[in-house]
Amino acid sequence: MSYPQETFLHTTLLPGSLVARRRAVVSSSTLSYQLDVLKETGRYDAFKLQWHPTYSHAAETWPVPKHLFWDSDVGKWIEGACYCLVDQPNVDIENAIKELVQMIRSAQQPDGYLNIHYTVVDPEKRFTNLRDMHELYNCGHLIEAALAHNHLYRNDDLLEPMLKYVDLLCRKFGPGADQIHGYPGHPEIEQALLRLHDRTQDPRHLELAQYFITERGNPNGVEGENYYVVEAKRRNEPPAMRPRAYPEPDSLWYCQAHKPIVEQETIEGHSVRAMYLLTAVADLVKSQNSPNHRLKEAAYRLWDNMVDRKMYVTGGIGAIKQWEGFGIDYFLPQGTDDGGCYSETCASIGTMMLAERILQYDLNRKFSDILELCLYNAVLTSMSHDGTKFTYVNQLASSEQDLSKREEWFTCACCPPNVLRLLGSIGGYIYTQARASEPSQAQINVHLFIPSTYQFQVDGQDATLTQKSNWPWEGRVAFELKTKSDQVNLALRVPGWAKSWKMSPPPPTETLQRGYLVLPATWLSSNPSFTLEIALTPRLIAPHPYTNQDTLTLARGPIVYCIEDVDNAWVQDHFKTVQLDPHCKIDEITVTDKDTNDAYVALKVIKGASLMNMDALHASPDARIEELDKATGADAKIIEELIFVPYYFRANRGGRGQMRVGLKRWNK
Amino acid sequence: MSYPQETFLHTTLLPGSLVARRRAVVSSSTLSYQLDVLKETGRYDAFKLQWHPTYSHAAETWPVPKHLFWDSDVGKWIEGACYCLVDQPNVDIENAIKELVQMIRSAQQPDGYLNIHYTVVDPEKRFTNLRDMHELYNCGHLIEAALAHNHLYRNDDLLEPMLKYVDLLCRKFGPGADQIHGYPGHPEIEQALLRLHDRTQDPRHLELAQYFITERGNPNGVEGENYYVVEAKRRNEPPAMRPRAYPEPDSLWYCQAHKPIVEQETIEGHSVRAMYLLTAVADLVKSQNSPNHRLKEAAYRLWDNMVDRKMYVTGGIGAIKQWEGFGIDYFLPQGTDDGGCYSETCASIGTMMLAERILQYDLNRKFSDILELCLYNAVLTSMSHDGTKFTYVNQLASSEQDLSKREEWFTCACCPPNVLRLLGSIGGYIYTQARASEPSQAQINVHLFIPSTYQFQVDGQDATLTQKSNWPWEGRVAFELKTKSDQVNLALRVPGWAKSWKMSPPPPTETLQRGYLVLPATWLSSNPSFTLEIALTPRLIAPHPYTNQDTLTLARGPIVYCIEDVDNAWVQDHFKTVQLDPHCKIDEITVTDKDTNDAYVALKVIKGASLMNMDALHASPDARIEELDKATGADAKIIEELIFVPYYFRANRGGRGQMRVGLKRWNK
């Protein structure tokens, strides 16, 4: 099995690209910045199992206390650090990892149990609230940390205690009469267990992952009822008592436990949970010798529902703040003033993981296009250029209530260390190696155009595939395959948004297979160097009419653009009244920002937009079309120049936090 | 003081108009239909204080049990019946009222307490959950029933027990150290007490109403906290336990108790509660000798916020189902598929009551335009032509989940008997009599054009004002004033939507005063007969751009139109993909429906609309404008003919329940 968390070791990012720069800043700054925060907030020392004042705070988001995720924050940081240390050694970081690992080991209970909250704060209540209390989620992240740690250091210092904890879980959870028939409210451990199984080949690890996945949402799990319903009764929770995230009683869809996954028709609830769960589902589908077709179909069905009807133009998912998740089909308001928009960073990282998993068994551009969309927009937008400020929510339009700006940290701090993990292992998302039709051959699939080299073995020979480009700003990608073997096949993704593309020398066929250009070994052996040139021209994206958003969004290649007050200082209303002409001319400007030293292509629209005259519009419910036509037409004021910058680059240059992605279409 | 519940006695509807027909069917059918339902469901006998099986049902909408409103259902039916019996005697109805009054009297406890639930089901808990349990709401409706009963029968059979109950309340509630510092979760008793005070002149009745209004939302009401917060603690309710309607903990805005009314900037929460509360506020403003300016301003501010930003084109209010109330500004989805729409019947009845109250001290078309809008659309749409089927929710677009259809009754049955009360007393909304500048003169304001006579006294003389028309289908209204006095002044509303109007003979001035045409006594005495002709031409209404609805709605005069599958049988998607040309030609067709015998003007658009080609649209997040343009433009299919009927008339002729008010604007 191959996982990006491991295959990234085969990939070396060439310096200078946008992604390489972001990964470099993670290594050089974010790691130590986050380590400081872990220390300052008490997370670092938490595995010492002493009382921390935070533990006494009331659970504002009942029943979840503030410190509930601390285990995972530490675990994710260790995991991300282990990925970055591979090519950027750092003694301070390594020492911290060592100390943390020792603390984690010492925090383990004699029976293998390992959790801060349920050891220090509430030791009598282990495994009594799987629905809300993130016990298994924390364990999952620590397993993933242990796998990364083991991979880097080739020792079992962290893996050993985790295996011991997993032993306990394998005894505790399962279909047996004396076992708990539950599953984690927040999926994560499923992915971790599947990766662990890949490493250990211990069948119990696969079985437990499979049990958590297939038992989930069983309507007759315990005593003829859903496990969570029975669990809540055992806690003597009155039915009217519900987690803060539940808009209504019994909102088990919040954690995708309202019915078995194979019966779920639409993607619902907390979007990070959904993505982590489906990533594990896709992994299980791939892992199984006799694939579970119903699980496979469920993953496709939920993917399609999500991408076609519940995904923002930035790759963000989750319209609803209260449950940090999905709304109804086509409900995609851009920001708080429009009725919502959450688009959590972790959710789009989860989408990338899910896409990567599916691409392992289904090479189809529809997955890699979304992988790239998420990376360059919803995910990269979540970290400042210098790697020390983050977003959790990534709305597409600011409002007075929710300005477009980044924070130093969060009480619930899942996102910042998730970016660390993702960028640390980003190389693993660029290429996948699949089983070739001939056993002696190699089949390399190229999903992303990030300047890099990929090293692999084929037919007993070393091989290196290199791609060089100024992606995402220029569309010319030069590939070079270096190997003595003539047994390498390639498949190159041609992005769905590409209006045109050409190869030099011309490929053997111009027909794409599910969006991939297939270059067979026979052709490659005589054409080891070639360029793919993808047209990168600005385009206008229009949301589906069912979204009720008559807006236009600028994009160029994989980059989605936004407009900010920094470049358009006159704005007072978060660009709510800006109208963009669908026939406007869009100029490209190459910029190197002097403060951040980030280079990018900005877009400029001259006299192609206008401001509605809101004074001419009275708001009462029976306004006439003539009035609206006047406000948006004759009375509208031409805007001399509008400047757009990449959405990921927003909030890097100060300003007042006014920003918008989709602008009203100007119906002239 | 004048209240429509009493002044309607001065008005006689001329038979044949839409409103007169609906009121007649209420008298002839609805009253006895609803009486049967009251009997079948247990409500009729509930004041016998026996156990009913329903009392054992679980509170699905915790903490509100199903039977909690039964007192009010009976009270509202009695009230409505008393209005209808004025001109349509009915022995069966009268006997039922007699029996109910006797049962209510016998249900009263020795100390005056009178409530079914807290006498039969939970006798130890009186006044311990004002927030949720509708105890004072029920009392308010019984007071209003008693006032109507007293007015009709000129006896105190029902008023006497209610006065005794109010005595108890006056002792229990108030600012005194030994009194409860609470107020009703669902306002209603405030209006009732103000009307009661008008009848009794007992200062305690005014004081209690005033206390409930001004104490509401006091952040330091009890022990330095909001009363409801303390009340919940006294009930030992864990903070995580919350009523079903509360999306989040502490959602006191649900019942407009998050802060004092005078500090509320926007209208929030349950829309019926908000309207009942503000009606009482407006009444209090009018009642007080030294008006409370802050209350007055609050009523205006909340009215403007509601009408300008939170009202549907039908006069409906409330976008959100969960709390049956207001969403954020400009969030006005048309139906479930668009993200919501509640528009409860009672809420628009409440809006009419509020508008009427304000018109008593502020003669301004902006209030009466909304009064008329609500009546002919959001309210009339809630009852079938034969008066036996009702809607509770009045969405502007149907969906598979929420078809456009009426029901026979509801578990929470506030709306059907509310229509009874409203239509029973509708005459009281047509005219108001204000203080004239000269004491000997009369000032009659005409707000609605419903064919009717209004009888009044002026300067010791009888006077009758008659208006005849075929409103709302024809705009010519013939007025005739008959009196020996020459001291009558009139003010006629000229609707804001009227493109043009003319009078014959010409009025002394064509200048409107805040939307009213003022006809002074001097002119009227020589022109006692005149006609006002208001142009009724179809028009297109466009919602505010901030609503993100690029739709067009057909209207003609006060009537808002919808499109139904009955007339447009090809529809399969609830008209989601119909696009209407803003320059379409709209034909008028006079129809007399053969089944219902209802006459109305239908509207027809020939080749002025098209169907988007949804096959040409893929739904993923990065669809190009070119694709949308094709689906809505070149590939769209012209619709030969679209038929529109009045929204109030929907769901009267069978069909599949597919309906829509606002159609996508066709951007050609």
Image (cartoon, coloured by chain):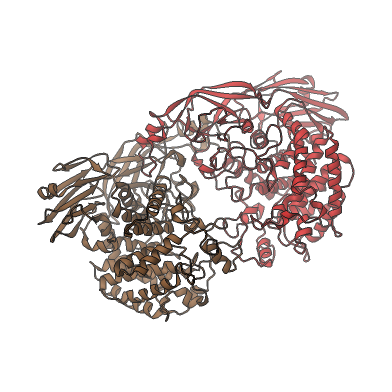
Chain colours: A brown, B red
Where does the image place residue A636, in percent across and percent down from the top left? 44, 34
Which image quarter holds the N terminus of chain A?
A: bottom left
How far across and down, in percent of the image, does residue A74 sit? 38, 70
Q: Residue at x 66, y 37 (%)?
A: B382
Q: Pick out the residue farthest to the right.
A: B155
Question: Left of A666 or right of it: where is B110?
Answer: right
Q: Is residue A366 above or below residue B168?
A: above
In which quarter of the view is residue A277 placed? Answer: bottom left
Dividing the picture into quadrants, the one containing residue A611 is top left
Question: Where B543 falls versus A649 (above or below)?
Answer: above
Seen from the viewer's position, the closer of residues A187 and B314 is A187
Res. B420 visible in picture? yes
Q: Nearer the viewer, residue B104 or B194?
A: B104
Q: Where is the C terminus of chain A found, in terms of image quarters?
A: top left
Query: Is residue A300 shown left or right of residue A62?
Result: left
Image location of residue A268, percent across then percent down: 47, 53
Residue B440 placement, left or right of A638: right
Q: Farthest residue in the top direction? A: B505
Depth check, front residue: B572 or A380: B572
Report the label total.
0
Looking at the image, is B13 positioned above or below residue A221?
Answer: above
As displayed, is residue A609 above or below residue A235?
above
A258 relative position to A27: left or right: right
Q: Position of residue B582 (x, y in %)?
A: 49, 28
Whether residue A32 is visible here, answered yes or no, is no
Q: Residue at x 62, y 53 (%)?
A: B254
